[in-house]
Each structure stands twice: as structure tokens, then as C-alpha cells.
Image: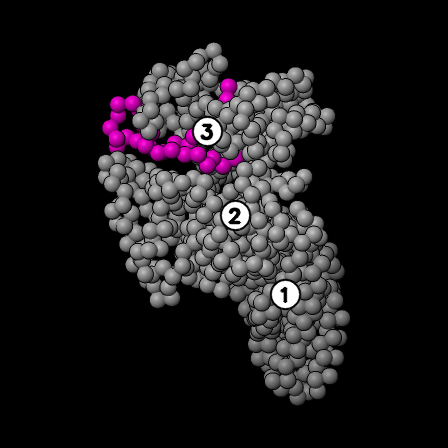
Amino acid sequence: MLFNYLTSAYRNLVKTRISSFINIFGLTLGMTVCLLLLFYVKYEKSYDLFHSKADRIYRLRYERTDSKGDAVRFASCTPPAGALLREQFAEIEKLARVFFYQASISHENTKFYENRIFFVDPEFAEIFDFNFLSGDPVKDLAQPGNAFLSVSTAKKYFGETEPIGKIISIDKKEDYQIVGLFEDVPHHSHIKMDFLLPLQNIIQRYGDSYMREWGHTGMYTYLLMQKDADITTFQTKLSPWVKERIPWLEQYQMKIDLPMQPLRDIHLTSHFMQEYEPNGSQSVVTYLRIIAFFIIVMAWVNYINLSTARSLTRAKEVAMRKTIGASRRQLTIQFLIETILINLIVLILTILALEVGRPFFSNLTNMPVGLHAWQQHWFWPMTLTLFCIGVLLSSLYPVLALSSFKPVDIFRANTSSVIKGLNLRKVLISFQFIMALILLVCTFTIYDQISFMRRLELGFNIDQVLVFTSPRVRPQDSEQRFKTFHAALSKNENIRKTCHVTEVPGKQLYWDAGDIKKAGADDSAGKNYQIVGIDYDFAEVFQLEFIAGRNFSRDFATDGESLILNETAVRWMGLENNEGAIGQQVDYWGDIYTIIGVMKDYHQQSPKAAYEPTIYRLMPTGRDVRGQFAVSLNSRDSRDTIHFIEGTYATFFPGNPFEYFFLDDHFNQQYQSDELFGRVFTLFSFLAIIVTALGILGMSALNVARRRQEIGVRKVLGASVLRILYLLSKEYIKWVFIACLVAWPIAGTVMHLWLQGFASRISLGVGRFAASALIALAIAFVTVGAQAWRTALANPVHALRYE
């Protein structure tokens, strides 16, 4: 019996090969897209879950709020908090502090600039489940001068030579002995480290005063809470606890909070100052999850509509089977087996499509190429669930519709009058139009916003600017060397200007200072500002505009006690206007500085962020601070110039690696997350539109089949082809306009919320909504038109021969 069912199912697939192909293609496309999107969503949500105690690990942050309620939020914490918390709260099982560092690392003649150096407490290895291959991290990280390296980093420095026992040097100032190795950190970890060193070295370097300073940040603090700890209650204890230990908070009317971040939430929800690196986006994950859901639902709706269209042609077959004795149970089994067969084919094709499309998808989303969807623990349960739901939904309507009618009704009446449920199918097609319109409006808006950011005037020049790290290894006469290095570079005809700056535009600012106010103002007027250390040529290299006052100049010996503010800082300080700010004095932690210039606002990072109140001060060339050199070139085709700069750098600052980048390439990396979202959203929206078109094609086939005899009568009575085309298309036009009334408010609300994440943003406008309606109408006309045209040209005799 089963063989007969399978044979019948196979014959029906072959007999209706076009309809079967559309069914299989639509379901395969929908299921593949759904699983790919879920693959990306699951990957983004898997960050840090490989730690066995992830549900009990929290990161302690630092927030400082002034008297006006303006807050500065950091991902790191303040140095004193960790040591004191560990001693005074029983809710904490273990605590580890982390100091994130960048430096020049060298071994003999091998040297690199490294930006994933972590100084940690020994408990770090007990809180987190990083895999140590050798050494005892709890014991060894308690001893200053020890070092653990990742496997790939060890190979970079030592090749196949045994690294244990070897000595590495940081900035040619501190030597560390390698005592162990750890596996490369998993890609889905917000902590990505190449070097693991004892925090005790940092404490010795900066002294106890640094560890007691509540106003500083930069010490990342992780807590492993007790299993029975009440996190909410513990969090409420922290603010009063901090207030007791900082007497100057009340004097300056400030507040310091230490919010707790669950480890599992950091990657998608943490976007504060001093993050290790840019994190993912919870909103992107949510949007893509919704798209995945609607695409698979649209694919199922398509299948139901196409199956219903086919049911009209199979009604007489079913009636004949009932006449010769087939029971409803047998008919149900037959339709169920046909549906299972189609869904099995879809399942196999989906898995093949996932594997074939994996490299492209990995490249599109920046996921690791080695990840396979079918290897993930969630994949098979999710896939089989989608398969079962698809079988149930796809077979339910045909089974109920075709197995319930009486054969005599089919033989004596129009089959379409017997097959019910057309109103439901109209609702389903309207649903697809609604989804298509929402996706179109969202796609247009996302594309236009990203294009707008790309075109936006940044306020400074990023073209033909070469950036490289200032030397970390500095001799005693480094101040004089900085001056002669500048002079040596200026002799090259392809170099316009060179400057030294703490952070070039495009880099996150790590230097901030609070309690800065206009001289003579009350203590409560102190606010937080971003600080940038610059030299005399900074403004010229980046072609920055002064709207009042002047730049720093070597002609003024007093410029060491002067400041330049940006426009936002002028307003933030409460000064009357830009011109009026010139000559005003500023109280910077008790030292008095004079404002000599106001610089036009520019976007330090992506235009997605608002302008920050920023103060610029001269940075002495001999000062041991992190920074970069920026060189403005006359030509981008500058290999010889780069070789010249590298050679000159090596001459003046031996022992320092020379690593450079072009500023425009680096700055454009800030758009990557938004462009990634735009690419993924656009691609899968396009695929969703294809799924929608298939659904409309199925519905139009059903509609034409249902009205074939009516069309035949109209043609006999003299109706023109155009009249028949209009007759068959008008209800789709109506559905599109109804869908617009539903879709536009939804799309507008969603995009309004999304655009709130951008300080500089486009307005929604009506053009994108109108364009979405025109495209939806075009889809309807193209898909319906082919069916309607063929029917309108057909001989009416064929439709009326059984009347």
C-alpha cells in the first residue's frame, strides 16, 4: 500500500512539474534563508556562552554623573573598586581585574606592535574557561614577570621552536618569561587576548596611588557571584558603598555608580566608552530574527496557495477515487505522503544549499569560514521542527478541502464552487504584500541612511593621510628625536605635513577628564570632556577649520597653558558664543588655562555618534603617552615614500615596529557593522520579495483557474483582451492598496526607531513609501499578467465545452 502511495505521489509531482518546481523552489528558498539568518542570530547570541559559569559572571562598569544629570559611561571600572569589593561582599565568589594594554613586543630581532595584551589577576583563570595547554595560570599569574601566550602568537614569534622559557620584552622596558600557552581564544568571545600577564606588574609600574584613585578608569573588573546571590539586592548596595568611600562626591555634587553587566549580554548590548572592540547589535539580531520568521511563513503560505490551485485540477481525480471506494483516511494518507515527499526533497536541497552558500554567507556576515550550520547543536532540532510544521501546514488545507466534499457535487458543478476557503487565501496574499511593503520601505531607508553617512561631510580630511604608532621604546633624548624626526620627514617632497596626536580622527578617544569648568564657576559646574593631545601641525594635517581664535603656535611660549575647544565644548561649558569664548579661562583640575581657539566640530568617529565636547591641549613630544603620527601625503601612490618614512622611523626610534594604515581605510571600517546589516537585510529582503512573487503567482493561477469559464463567457459576449486583463488584475491592485494602509505605519514606526540610533540621520519622507507601492504593483502586474494574458488569449470554446 505504501508503495502505491509513493508511486501516486511521484506521478503527481511529474505530472504537475511546473507547479511542483515552484513549490519546491519556494520552500527551499524560504527554509534556506530562514536557517541562514537563524545561523547568524545564534552565532551572535552565542558569545561567551562557552564559559561553564557564564550565568554567574558579571562585568562591573563605571558611570560618573555630574550635578546636571549628564553621565559618562565606561565599559571599564575604577582601580580601587576591585580590591575593596573582594574583601567586603560575601556575594562575590571570585573577582578578577583586567588591564587592557597595547605595546611593542619583541624577542631578539622579532618585533610586532600588539593590541591584545591583558594584565590579569590570577583568579581570571578560575572565572573563565580559557583552555591553558601548559603552565599553572593561577600560580604563575600571581608572580610578576611571567607570561602566557596564545598558540598562534607563539608561532608568530618562535615558529616551531619551543617557546617555554623564552624572554619577551614590552617596549624594551620590561622583560617577561614565557611560562605557558593557551589555545587561541574562541571567535565568539568578547575577550580576545594574545598575551596574558600578571596584573601585579601594572600595580608595580603605576604605584599604589593609581590603585586608590576613584576618578580613573581602565581597570576592567569581572565578578563570579555565589550561586545563591541575589543580584538585584547586591546591585542596590553598590551606590551607597561607593558614596561612603569618596568624600568629594558630595562636594562636587557628583555620583558614581558601578552597574553590573551579565557576561552573556556584553556582546550585543554593551556600547560604552573603552570597549575592547566594537560589539554587535541586539537590534540587528532582532530585525533579522523577525525577517527569518516571516520568510519561512511566506514560503508556507505560498505552498498552501499553490496546493490549493492544484486542488482544483485534482478535484475530479479525488471524486473518482471516492466513487470507487477510497475512504477519507486513505485520501488523507495519500496527500500527507505527497506533502512529506515534497518537504523531504526541500530538506535535502536546503542542507545542500546551506553548505554550498556557506563561504559566501560567511564572507557577507564576517562569520568564521570554518563554521558549519549543520554542526551546531540547535540546527537539527530547529530544522526538523520547521520540516514538521511545514508538512502539517502544507497538507492540512488540501486534506480538509478535497477529502470532505461529495463526489456528486464535483461531477455536476464547477469545481471551484466546491473548493472553499478563497477568503482565507486572500488574507494570506494580503499578508505577503504587507510583508513585502515593510521590507521594501526598510531596505530603502537603510540603504539611504548608510549612503547619507558615507556622503556626510566629516569636518576633516581623511584622504592620503598615513598613520603609524608613535614609538613605545623611547631613549632618554626622545624629545629632541621627535623634533628632528619631524624635520627629517619634511624634507621629502611627497610629505605635506606631519603631526603627533594621542588619537587620530577615526579612533576612539580614551582620554577624558571630569570636573572641568569655567574659571571662577561653582564646583557643581564641573563637567566631563574628551581630551585630545595634539601638536602644532595637527589642524593643518587634517585640514580642520577654526571658527574663532587661532591654532597653537610655536611663536607663543604661553601656549602650553592654553586650550582649544570645539563648538560642542563651548556650549557644554556654558560660554556665550564661539567668539566670546576666546580669552576665557578654564579651571582644569585646579590649573588655569586660557582658551585661544574654537575648532569646528568634526566626527571623531562614525557620524552615527553625536559630537562630543572636546578639549585640545598641547602634548609635549617627550611625554610617555600613547599616540600616533599622522603624515599628510601629496599622493596615494607612495611606496617609495612609505619606505622612506619606515627607514627614517627605524633610524630615530630603533627597536620599535613600524605598522601603518591609511586613515580613509581605517575610518571606513566604522561603517562595517551598519553596512553588514544593510547588505544582509537587502539580500534577504530581495529573496523575500521572490518568495512573495511566487505566492502571488500561485494565487493568480488559482484565480484564473476558478474564473476560466466566466472569462470564456465574457469573451463570447465581446469582452476585449485588455478588459479581461483588468478584470483579473484589479483585485490585486486592491490588495496592494489595502496592504499599504497596514504596512506603511508599521514600516515607518520600525524605521523611526532604527534611525534614533544615528545622531546624523535622514528623514523618512514619502518617496520611499511611494516607491514600495509601485514595486509591489509591478510585482503583481508581472506575476498576474502572464497568467491573465494567456487566459485572455485562449479560445473560449475550451473553457465552455463542458457547460
Is residue 617 shown left or right of residue 135?
left
Viewer-nearest of discs 1 and 2: 2
Magenta residues?
A: 507-536
Residue closer to the observer: 449 or 41: 41
Q: Which residue is mark 1?
A: 375
Q: Position of residue 108 (x, y in %)?
A: 66, 41
Residue located at (51% from left, 33% from top) = 626
Residue 672, given in percent of the width and then of the height, sits at 58, 42
- The Cα atoms of the two marked residues, 1 and 2, are separated by 41 Å
Q: Which residue is mark 3?
A: 532
In the image, what residue occupies the spot 47% across and 60% down? 126
- Residue 790 is one of the magenta-drawn residues: no
Q: Is residue 377 visible?
A: yes
Q: Residues within 10 Å of mark 2 (few under 14, many from 20)?
A: many
Q: Is residue 125 above or below residue 465?
A: below
Judging from the image, the colouring scheme is: one colour
Reading the image, the residue beneath label 2 is 145
Distance from label 2 to label 3 (Cα)? Answer: 33 Å
Q: Residue furthest bottom?
A: 325
Counting residues from the N terminus, which is met first, the one under dot 2 or under dot 3?
Answer: 2
Q: Nearer the viewer, residue 731 or 358?
A: 358
Q: Can you tell which quarter of the image residue 455 is in?
A: top right
Mark 2 near mark 3, Cβ–Cβ under 8 Å? no
Q: Residues within 10 Å of mark 1 (few under 14, many from 20)?
A: few
Extreme residue toward the top, this view: 555
Instruction: Determine the residue positioned at 52% across, 45% down.
Output: 277
Label 3 residue SS: strand
The residue at the point 53 percent across, 27 percent down is: 476
